[in-house]
Amino acid sequence: MHDKYYKKVMENLKKNSYLKKAESGDAEAMYLLAQEYENEGDFDTAFLWHNEAANHGSVDGIHSVAMYYLEGFSVVRDATRAIQLLESIADEFPIAKINLGCICLEGDGCPRDSGKGMELLRQAADSGEGLAAFTIGKIYLDGLCGLPVDYGKAAPWLEKSYELGIYECVDILCDLYGGKYSHKLENTEKYRQWSDARKDISGRTPNPYFQSFSPRQPVTDDGSGVSVMNERNGRQYVIIDNEKAYVDLLVAETFLPNVNPAVYTEVEHIDGDMSDNSAQNLRWVEKK
């Protein structure tokens, strides 16, 4: 109880210190005060202080106001206003460039432009922003925003994100080089390399932006964000908890009664199209 009370007192002292500086016109204190209100769940007051920080030239404040407008959080959603604010700081604030790239890829508040979106992400990555490299890797990995799945392109970008401090990409790299996504990318030497890296990252400090802030992430065209992959015969699968799960089996287990599960253990595509996983195109059959 004493520790809890002490912590509350210290938080109030810190908040009052920020408030005093903010009222005297300190833009950084305004931004930090806004974060304190966010931590308390008072987002309306947080937005007011973010806006004050922005008006006093704080790049962090401008970015926060842009994201509030983009998400319609405590204000009426205004994607056009958000884009204007992000563009005003993109050259000096790489995270803003990442969000602009994702907006262009989705066509949210502007015409969809995959080329421009990817270029903005590349620029942010080239400036040393690991989150941008990770986002590019995920776009190629999952085939987001109308771009095709390309594991060969995903891998080097994910590797670059690791070099730039995004250690959370290691599990994906292990799966890529372990052949879980595609046998073409299977590489024993690289798998061992990234398996060793996975053992080493426990003592490393995670990227603070990756832990506390995520850019506006692109999603698949159907909005699911789930990566659907194909085997050589066209059969589709997804990765769930690092395990391969076949889409046709998931659909059949959910929508098709199986009168004898001990006998009928496989699913057949009635029209032979392995990419058509609609329930009406599937039926339970005996193992061949």
Image (spheres, helix red, strand yellow):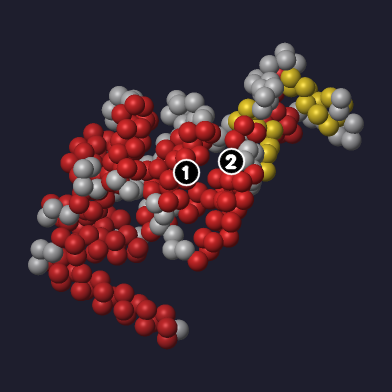
> Relative to residue 81, is residue 113 depicted above or below?
above
Q: Name the spot of residue 190 as percent of width and height, x first.
A: 58, 46
Q: Is residue 278 left or right of residue 259?
A: left
Which numbered tag is attached to residue 16? Answer: none
Q: Secondary structure at mark 2?
A: helix
Q: Is residue 274 left or right of residue 156?
A: right
Which residue is located at x 20 percent, y 58 percent? 49
- Seen from this angle, which residue lies furthest bottom? 2
Q: Nearer the viewer, residue 27 or 170?
A: 170
Alpha-carbon span between mark 2 and mark 1: 10 Å
Q: Is residue 165 above or below residue 87?
A: below
Question: Residue tagged by mark 1?
Answer: 158
What residue lies at 38% left-to-right and 59% top-to-bottom?
A: 208
* 265 vs 27: above or below: above
**Is the residue under label 1 in contact with that under label 2 (CB below 8 Å)?**
yes
Mark 1 Cα-neighbour bin, 10 Å: few <14, some 14–19, many ≥20: many
Q: Amino acid at mark 1?
A: Leu
Q: Which residue is mark 2?
A: 176
Q: Give the quadrant of residue 37.
A: bottom left
Q: Position of residue 5 (x, y in %)?
A: 38, 82
- Looking at the image, can residue 170 be seen? yes
